[in-house]
Image (spheres, grey):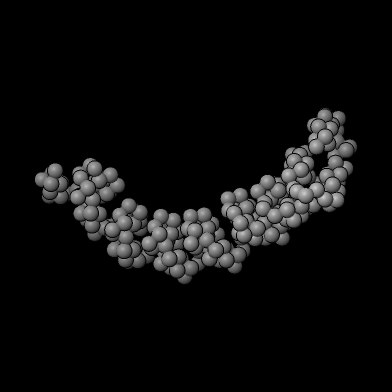
Amino acid sequence: MQKAWENCLEKGISTQDLQAFVKTPFLGGLWFKEEAGELLLQRSSSVEEVLFVIENMRSLRLKAWDKLWEIEPTAHALVRVIKWTRSLRRKAWMKLLQMGPDRDDLMTVIEKARNLRWEAWRKLIEIGPTNENLEEIIRYRHGKMKYEATKRLLSQRPSNRQLGTIMLYGNSRKLTLESMEVLISNNPDMEDIKSIYHHYQMIIPVSKRKRRLKHEAWDKFKDTPEGQLKSLRRIKLF
C-alpha cells in the first residue's frame, strides 16, 4: 500500500484524488490521510479547497486557517468555518464582525453556533431583522430569544401568517393574546379564524379577554356566505 501511494505521488495525483484520500482514508489507509491533507493544503489556491481541509482535517485546521487568510476569504466562507469547526469559531466570528455580516450570515450563526448565538442576535437587531428572520427564530429557537423575537415581530406589522406562527410557536401567553387581537383587527380569512378558535382553548387560564376575542372572531364571520356556515358552526362548538 505504501508503494502504491508513492507511485501515485510520482505519477502526479490529482486534487480530486487527494480529497478522496482525506475524506475516505480507508482508500489508502489511515496513515495516508495526514500526508494527503498536507499535500492538498500546499496545492490549495481557492477558498473552497482550503475550506475542504478545515472541514475534514482537524489536525490541520490552524494551518488551513492561516492559508485561508492568504487567499482573502468571503463572509460566506467565514460562516462555514463557524458552522463546522468549534476550535476556529471565535476567530472566524471576530473576522466576520469586521467584514460586516448580512442577515443570512447571522441567521446561520444563530442556528449553528450555540456559544455565539446571543452575540449574533444582538448584531441582527443592530442591522434590523426582517419579519421572516424573526418568524424563523420563533419557530426554531427556545426560551428568551423566542420571546424577544416575538416582541420584535409584533412591533414590525407582521402578516396574518406570521401572527399565526406566534400563536402556534410562541412561549408567552400575553404575546399570544396580543397576536390574536392584532389578527382580529386585520380582517382575517377563514383559516386565520380557525387558528384563533384553536389557540383560544390552549391558553390557560381562561379569561374575559380571551372570551371577548373568541366572540369578536365569531362576529367577524357570522354573515359569511352559506357555503362556509357549516364549518363555522362546527368551530363555534369549541
From where the camera sits, is residue 11 visible? no
Q: Residue 226 at x, y = what percent? A: 86, 30
The quadrant in which the N terminus is found is: top left
The quadrant in which the C terminus is found is: top right
Q: Residue at x 67, y 53 (%)?
A: 171
Q: Residue 216 at x, y = what percent? A: 86, 46
Q: Residue 234 at x, y = what percent? A: 81, 32
Count of labels shown?
0
Q: Residue at x 38, y 62 (%)?
A: 87
Q: Is residue 72 left or right of residue 152?
A: left
Q: Nearer the viewer, residue 215 or 192?
A: 215
Q: Nearer the viewer, residue 136 or 215?
A: 215
Against 206, residue 129 (above or below) is: below
Q: Is residue 94 left or right of residue 55?
A: right
Against 200, residue 63 (above or below) is: below
From where the camera sits, is residue 3 visible? yes
Which residue is the extreme one toward the left? 3
Residue 118, located in which quarter of the rendered image? bottom right
Q: Is residue 90 left or right of residue 127?
A: left
Q: Residue at x 85, y 51 (%)?
A: 208
